[in-house]
Image: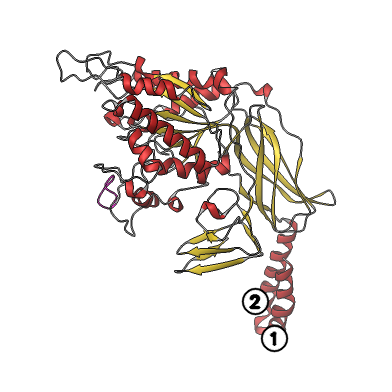
Amino acid sequence: MQYLKTFFSFRILPYFSEVFSSSRESFFKWALLIFFCLNLLSTDLFAQISVTFPVPRAVIQRTNTNRANLYIVGRLSASADKIEARLVPRTEQARLDTILATPWQTVQQMPSKVFSGSIVAKGGWYNLEIKATLNNVLVGNVSVIERIGIGEVFTFVGHSNAQGGAYDLTGPNSIDDRVSCIAVGQEPSCNAGYPYYQPATGSDSLWCKYLQTADAQYLPVLKFSKVSIASGIAPFTSRPWYWSIVGDSLTRKLNVPVMFYGAAFGGSNSEHWYKAAYGIPFTHSFIKSSIGMPYINLKNVLQLYVPLTGIRAVLCLHGVNERFSSQADIQTWMEGYIAQSRVDSKIPNLAWMIALDSYILDHGQNPPPNPINYAPRNAQTIVRTEANNFSGPDLDVITDNGGGLASSDRPDGLHFANQGLVSAANLWVNAIINPSFIKVSLPKVSQSLNIQSRQSGNWQQVSSWDCNCFPQNYHSMTIVTGHTIQIDAIKAKTMNIVLKGNLSFMNQGFLGF
């Protein structure tokens, strides 16, 4: 604002002096003068807070005491000595009397043009109100961000019964307004077609580019959405499957919003996840191990999304595709990728909930063999007793109860359908709300949005930053003295940057705000 005033005073007025000397332009001169004056006046009187985060439908993981720090960042267009915020409950709560408005809390004292801070809140579904004051007088208007959640955050991994995709079923839209995800949309039509991962073309969507490269820069970040058939679930799920039903039930039972990240990959098994986690090549007809699939989906969730929102647990559904492997191998693979997820996330106690899953009924054999495969089932039983692992649902109780007919819960003897989808959702919900899980597992809460370099390196490398994250345009960043951060062939994004060290640019890389 001060710059604009100076520019007006010393650059524009001399020009107007020349205009004023011509009576022919008297009307034009006054119109321009009034326009500039009103523009400056309105900017002073009605300066607004521009909030970068949170955005509508964001859900932040709560602690086991039902609290969370909600980090707030934004820009301020006028002078103020305090930024304050409060949360006002929305009426979608199942039991509104248990969720109260917070008092006004200080986000930041003596803010600059960029502000950053946090407030404390209980679990619930809110509208966020933010205001700036100067000498206890309101500056501009109170900004309102609707649908902000403090609740439970999960990511799911596994094969097609976790990702969805059988019988062209999508699963239903969420009914409850409080079931969120980050939207990627429906399965895209990429160059040469998914899942062959041909080189991206200029006309391909960003999600196509992610499918072809697994590069997190192509994933949406602040695109929160209600879970629906149209939304998809970032980073890798194109349909709600039964997770919308899980979310609807959890929001009713827990009375807090729920958010999902979809990292499952249909057709994968624990061997693929283990080898991808440790960079061991393997050959598969449609899983491209050279880009880190399928494990890279989980790694991107843990390093791109979890620092922003936090997480309760990873929900794991593997087993049926390991039916030809030994119990010892399956146990080794599962323990391996679970351990690596805790390294990649820097969350040593990252909770994993592991389903029992081994059922497949082959109608081509007469008589059919036992549909329960004990090698994966026994391995899962052992792994879920280990530290920070928890017992998920026993999905083997859902059977082909219709002899392969379309009305069956598993028409092809493997994939859920019809009531099978509902049964699977209910089993997951019962496992999640069990006190032995929901009161014992240790959630990871969201991190501060003020970050700094921890060593020299590439902007996109999480090892360069103390947040173990990919920097985004909601971060206020400091490059520490002695560190050089390289921006290579990308548009780097930040909210604000304090440059004590050095930035270098290569291959048309640049910094945007």
State the extent of the magenta-drawn residues as a range: 191-197
Name the foreground residue: 131 vs 400. Answer: 400
Element on which disc 2 rests: helix
Q: Residues within 10 Å of mark 1 (few under 14, many from 20)?
A: few
Residue 152 horizontal side relative to residue 480, left or right = left
**In the depicted structure, whether residue 414 falls above or below residue 202:** above
Task: Name the amino acid type tagged 2.
Answer: Phe
**In the depicted structure, whether residue 199 falls above or below residue 429:** below
Quadrant in which the C terminus appears:
bottom right
Closer to the chain start, of discs 2 and 1, is 1
Residue 28, labelled with which disc? 2
State the separation of the CA atoms marked 2 and 1: 13 Å
Task: Name the amino acid type tagged 1.
Answer: Glu
**In the depicted structure, whether residue 44 falls above or below residue 470:** below
Q: Nearer the viewer, mark 2 or mark 1?
A: 1
Q: Residues within 10 Å of mark 2 (few under 14, many from 20)?
A: few
**What x and y, as percent, mark residue 395?**
38, 19
